[in-house]
Image: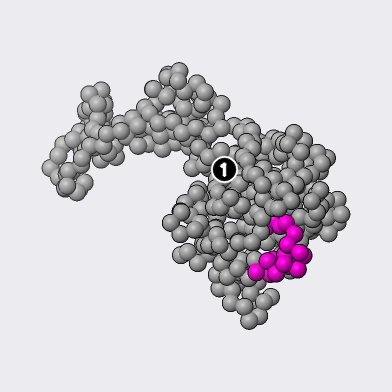
Amino acid sequence: MRILHTSDWHIGRTFHGHSTLENLGTVLDSIAVIVREKAVDVVVVAGDVFDSATPAREAFDVLSGAIRHIREAGAYVVITSGNHDSATRLGFQSEWAGLAGIHVITRPEQLDEPVIIDDAYGPVLFYGIPYLEPALVRHLYPGVEMRRHAQVLGYAMQRIRDDIARRDGARSVVLSHAFVVNVPGAGSSASEASDVERDITAGGLDLVSVDVFDGPDYVALGHIHGRSTLAPGIRYSGAPLHYSFAEATKPRGAWLVDLDAAGLDTVEWVDFPVPRPLAILTGELAELLADPSYADAEGHFVSVVLTDQVRPIDGMRRIQSRFPHAVALTHQPAIVAELPLASYSERLHARSDSEVVAGFLEFVRNGVGPTDAESDLIVEVIAEQAAQESTA
């Protein structure tokens, strides 16, 4: 059986105020192409299908189109809910969808009730663990301590392992949405997190050890937006789009997982298209506007770090004259003069009006005072004001 592991579609998320629906639709349509070209049997989505618990109609249209194209290409679909999703909304009419080969698992009681899909070697069991907030599910399991996410998932996985054992050791795949920590000394998936994953940890209480997921042939994880391999059969696929400049260098795609008669066989990476790449440009404004080496970024989403000593006037408009999709701009002077230790008010004492203005410019410009032309203008304006006051 061939499985395509995806997650974190986040349909409806914006990028610096810009809708991502069109670009995401392009990427999700490419999944159907991969299904055909790679003969994929099952596409799994490990949580955060939507970005919001109350997605707009347009977001449902994107989801419906993507799922329809995947089914038309010949693959079954298995989906579970993440912490961004409304389990109730996502799971609405899931019983009917299951009749069409689209299996949506959002209720806690479903976690050890596998979707069974057969291949030439027999059944493969797909278990979906919807995102389970301890405070919201502990009442369902009286007598079981569920103060931490790791405890909830530990209990869920034990129920899944018990169910697998009752089925004569059939091959199995688990979908889960969590912050999973790798084996001691080998790092943590939390280090792969960017600034867009909504924090579902609290002082480490919701980090889950990778050994919680021992047993299944493959574990398809969601929540981290960059791909990550915690063990050969336990992986994050990441998000299909770049949702933050912190993700700019992370590839976008999915894991292509092959199961043979004995279990996990091979796993390889499949790239998704990137409709509009991200670029982070650093330099002085004049350089960024003129340097031909930045030509490739003219069609990218761009974040600019200006290093001019003085913040340029109307910097974003001028940047957008060359990079129309520039969406973020910060000013970080390359050289910052060391300011005197005296307070601003102390430095103003017993100084002329022109010196006060010059001192103010130096203060707000990180130690850079007025240019010669600005100094001449300051003197001229102060003289004009003094003349007006003397004739008033």
Residue 316 in view of the camera: yes
Of residues 254 and 313, the one drawn nearer to the viewer in this rendering? 254
Residue interval drawn in magenta: 158-174
Residue 19 in view of the camera: no
Residue 218 lies left or right of residue 379; in this view the side is: right
Residue appearing at x 53%, y 62% in the figure: 209
Residue appearing at x 16%, y 36% in the figure: 352
Dot 1: few (<14), some (14–19), or many (≥20) neighbours within 10 Å? many
**Circle 1 SS class:** loop
How far from the left and from the top, in percent, is residue 85?
67, 56
Tag 1 residue: 243
Split into 4 quadrants, where in the image is the C terminus? top left
How far from the left and from the top, in percent, is residue 386?
22, 32
Residue appearing at x 30%, y 33% in the figure: 334
Q: Is residue 156 above or below residue 311?
A: below
Of residues 191 and 327, the one drawn nearer to the viewer in this rendering? 191
Q: Is residue 342 above or below residue 323?
A: below
- Furthest residue toward front: 262
- Furthest residue toward bottom: 143
Instruction: Answer whether residue 160 is magenta in the image.
Output: yes
Q: Is residue 125 above or below residue 138?
A: above
Residue appearing at x 78%, y 42% in the figure: 70
How far from the left and from the top, in percent, is residue 359?
21, 38
- Furthest residue toward left: 350
Q: Is residue 362 above or below residue 110?
A: above
How far from the left and from the top, in percent, is residue 159?
68, 69
Q: How is the image coloured?
A: one colour
Instruction: Answer whether residue 374 is magenta in the image.
Output: no
